Image (spheres, rainbow, N blue to C red):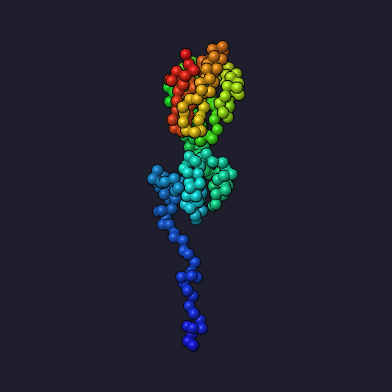
Amino acid sequence: MDQLTLFPLPDRAYSAKPVRPTLAIREKPGYRVLHNSSACNGAELIAAMVGGSRSLETAQRLLNAFGSLHGIARTSCAELTAIQGVRASAVLRLKAAVEIGRRLLVPEGDRPQIRSPADAAAILQPLLMHQDQEHLYVLLLDTRNRVIGEPLEVYHGSLNTSLIRVGELYRDAIRANAAAIILSHNHPSGDPSPSPEDVAVTRAVIEAGKLLDIACLDHVILGGMRHVSLKERGLGFG
């Protein structure tokens, strides 16, 4: 019996550990974001925030679980940390990035002036586009239709005339001596088409405003990246 028989060589096909391919430095998410973030896909951007040696795999799990960057932005912290490889510190960075992005969409400098429903939608869309419930906001305006302060959330849940107290919509407007308001709420379905309840709420708010000498100029409904003006459609106005 020869030496090879006594001491057989290991079968490399079965005993060798699988080798995970190593990305070249220029292909790593952190490098790509640092040097040309606009060329990165969604998985690379998420991977740069998640960090770790398997960040791309983790980022792809997040996208597979929640469908898109918008889906991840809408997801709760608990749901995000339930995904394999996602630590609490990574969720913190993801949520901070979403909030920074939202604030960058809000005009800065001089108080924005509302000249059209699109102007109101541009202010409110960052607040409402990722909500999974209906949220009702009010914009307070001065006599030149310039926005006073921040958009105010006054209600969330299904919009219903029996649940909404119209006086609450005007409370802050009275305190701020506002000349007018604009209502806005979202449809989580992504379809901004007005419902009969939306029209009924609008009509009630307009009538209350006449008594308070504070005009309700419009009710803008947001659905995803689209919006509908009830004033433009003549619903609840006139």
Query: Residue 48: where, in percent of width, then height?
Result: 47, 48
Q: In front: 184, or 175?
A: 184
Q: Quadrant of residue 159?
A: top right
Furthest-front residue in this view:
196
Q: Residue at x 45, y 48 (%)?
A: 43
Residue 138 lies, in percent from the top left, at 53, 23
Task: Please name whichever residue, 214 or 26, is drawn nearer the observer in this view of the structure.
Answer: 214
Q: Residue at x 58, y 29 (%)?
A: 157
Rendering quarter of residue 210 = top right
Q: Is residue 107 visible?
A: no
Nearest the viewer among 186 and 152 is 186
x, y percentage for residue 2? 47, 87
Image coords of residue 139 (percent x, y): 52, 23
Q: How many marks?
A: 0
Residue found 38% across the figure and 45% down from its top: 39
Q: Is residue 195 above or below residue 95?
A: above
Residue 42 sits above or below residue 150 on the image? below
Residue 196 visible in the current orientation: yes
Q: Residue at x 49, y 83 (%)?
A: 5
